[in-house]
Amino acid sequence: MSSAIRNRMQLHQQNIQSVLAEVFNHQPISRIEISRNLALNKSTVSALYRDLKEAGYVEELGEGDASNVGGRKPVLLAINRRYGYTMNFDFGYRHLHVMQNNLSGDVLSYKQINVLGLTIKQILPLIDVELDKVAAKDKTSHGLLGISFAIHGTVLDNQVTYSPFLDMEQVDLADYYTQKFQVPVLLENEANAAAVYERDFNKENDRLDNMVTISIHRGIGAGLIINQNLHRGTHGEAGEIGRSIPVGGDWSGTPRKVEDFCSEDAIINQIQTQKGAENMTRDDVVRLFNEGDEVTKSALNLFVKSVAAIIYNAANNFDPDVVFLNSPLLEELPELEPQIESFYAQTAPTILVPIKLTKNSHYATLLGGCALVTRQALGMEEAKLNFDAQTSVL
Amino acid sequence: MSSAIRNRMQLHQQNIQSVLAEVFNHQPISRIEISRNLALNKSTVSALYRDLKEAGYVEELGEGDASNVGGRKPVLLAINRRYGYTMNFDFGYRHLHVMQNNLSGDVLSYKQINVLGLTIKQILPLIDVELDKVAAKDKTSHGLLGISFAIHGTVLDNQVTYSPFLDMEQVDLADYYTQKFQVPVLLENEANAAAVYERDFNKENDRLDNMVTISIHRGIGAGLIINQNLHRGTHGEAGEIGRSIPVGGDWSGTPRKVEDFCSEDAIINQIQTQKGAENMTRDDVVRLFNEGDEVTKSALNLFVKSVAAIIYNAANNFDPDVVFLNSPLLEELPELEPQIESFYAQTAPTILVPIKLTKNSHYATLLGGCALVTRQALGMEEAKLNFDAQTSVL
DNA sequence: AGATTAGTTTGTTCAAACAACCAACTCACA
DNA sequence: TGTGAGTTGGTTGTTTGAACAAACTAATCT
């Protein structure tokens, strides 16, 4: 309520943003259509659009088709794709993922950099090199607009609070890059970023209020979209479903967490232990499964059942419109998905929440970060923006 | 975003509501203080207040104290407690709880009506009698403003979708009472109402964004306040944590639900089975525990451990500022609460979410319903309102 | 030519802001 | 103890400015 609009100046600012959001979400779009969508007078929309054009955010694309009963052709408006770009990173275990996007969320470039075994202080220079390379080639009017980092751990107020797979060694990414470039820098939990991706980049989900995105990588966590907003929790730890324990079980010793059953690490460990192997990777698991290895099949059977139970519990807790599974492993073994659905349907008594696999899970995380940092660059943190993820235009 | 303020008329309406909310939340309050709080010019506040006074929502209470450096005394404004009243019901297993509240949420009357063994169609006439009795005595200017019903089950769009303890027999409460009185009628899940109570009636929680209220009655469920809003879920089933199952366990037979371990029914059943007793009540359990009965002690020990695990899981899922326990059983056996906290602390590794017992859990549910239906009566569903729960004034 | 639609220009509207005022208080000081 | 300077609460009359409305231009169709 304290952020509510009260006077005409604030109203004006909000209306400018509403017009920008309309251009963003429905580009290419004409002024008259914006006027109808927002229930604002067409002269008002024209005036507001002028301000946006002066700021450089938008541009005219040319004329559209006239209506079939006669009348002047509309002028089509769109986001200025040459305004600037964002840089978005994902600290994977084996790879650092790097993506460059324009203001509209289009992918300008993507690459993976091998960082297996490197410390954060060895990775930092690699990031700097990528930023410099892109800056050298850049031809946009405003250049770098913002940077996002997807963290496989928990984040609070742009600080990493827990990072099980990569020691952050007191490195303050936000501070370092804000100082260096004077642009918004944003750290976000990887599952949260994936959830934002589903909300913002997926046209099918446009009307959905509540979504759970279960991210299964080395660990397991969930990103929560509640009432169209990302729910981070008071300490940035909402959706840490991997830590859940069974209720009513025996309390001898420490209780086993969900993560002990159905993270990729858990599966690999289980197979390694039974086979006496070492340093196995996801690819090894996929190969063994496809070869019909019994140990692997049994491990993945437990995995499938556990994921089904997790989905069932998440559905009971959050009651979403849909549950997404963001898992490179499932992406490579899509035949497991129907099994998960079957076990889930077996458990759930009445309401069955649809389950969907995220395709190209690496992209999802990066694009989610892009959506968040682009909002910050525009000063429109609260706006509903639909990104299109159109393929490269430059 | 579609409900965003766009033109001056809407802005004006919203500002009127903001002034009303200020009066509601800070009564008694002066115009000048509202002006400062809302960053609106004092003459603007005066004009907006005039409208509210004409509508009868507010009234002047007299003069307050002048500041100690001189100056005119402020005129203190408040909600008109004689404007009207709401009626709020809670369908308990043994009792129908009935509460009458004024526009400000003050309790005007409260009673319990024995309904053990009655069907919904036998209960309805009892409700009608209560409504008539109160209407006959009423001296407010606008009379009945709204009716709320707390349901021990799930609700979607004012319809009961699941009711394990009371067969609703196709009775449509909302339709029946809306037709009869032409006022807002509202059905809400009992745990949700309890959560709203904690948000709206508890000054300590004023600044808290995220709260989980775990309601342990015959069943077990949670009410979720996320980002200051009640999260009902897409199908009205969010927070149905009683249905959760263990992950990674054996899948022989149907998995045991949380509810099988730590609802009141579960405890009573367990004790009854072991003792060969029948028709035990909560009071019997309390008595047996206080007498030192071993079977009861062991059942409640499992209960305590299970509740601790539930709290831990809820904290991981939702990451709230605080967890409330709304449980008549714990209210009667408060010595169990430290045990729950101890087990919880044992399990949680880092962040410990504070646990609080709701006092007078029956009141909580009714007052939560009151808060929701009062908002509807005022047409201020989205406003942040702090109810004071002052004792009777009439 | 007449109908229709997109967008601009020009003047109007009206709720909030502003400025000046009145009302009523405190306190210091004679 | 009485007076006046300073302060605060609230009202009244005027100004302001962003959205609106109407009249316009532009460009299409049949």
Image (cartoon, coloured by chain):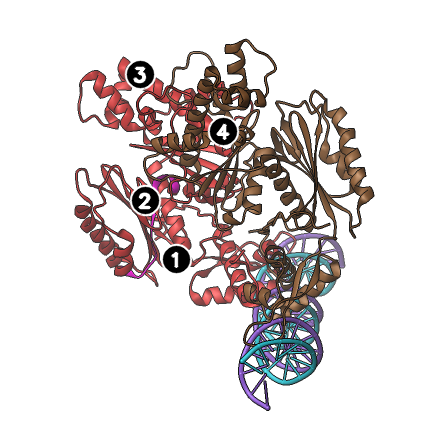
Chain colours: A brown, B red, C purple, D cyan
Q: Tell me, yes or no, whether dots 3 and 4 are on the same chain.
A: no
Q: In terms of image quadrants, where is residue C19?
A: bottom right
Q: Amino acid at mark 1?
A: Ala
Label 4, secondary structure: give it. Answer: helix
Q: What percent of the width, then of the height, locates residue A152?
A: 61, 29
Q: Tell me, yes or no, whether dots 1 and 4 are on the same chain.
A: no
The Cα–Cα distance between marks 3 and 2, rounded to whole angstroms, is 32 Å
- Name the chain under label 1: B
Residue shown at 73% from the left, 27% from the top: A171
Q: Is residue B51 above or below residue A362?
A: below
Labelled pair 3, 2 in contact (Cβ < 8 Å): no
The Cα–Cα distance between marks 1 and 4, rounded to whole angstroms, is 39 Å
Residue shown at 44% from the left, 46% from the top: B388
Magenta highlight range:
B181-192
Q: Nearer the viewer, residue D22 or A152?
A: A152
Q: Amino acid at mark 2?
A: Ala
Residue A241, which numbered label?
A: 4
Q: Which residue is mark 3?
A: B297
* Residue B185 belongs to the span the image colors magenta: yes
Q: Earlier in the sequence, mark 1 or mark 2?
A: 2
Determine crowd level at label 3: few under 14, some 14-19, many 20+ residues with C-alpha closer than 10 A. Answer: some
Residue B150, which numbered label?
A: 2
Labelled pair 1, 4 in contact (Cβ < 8 Å): no
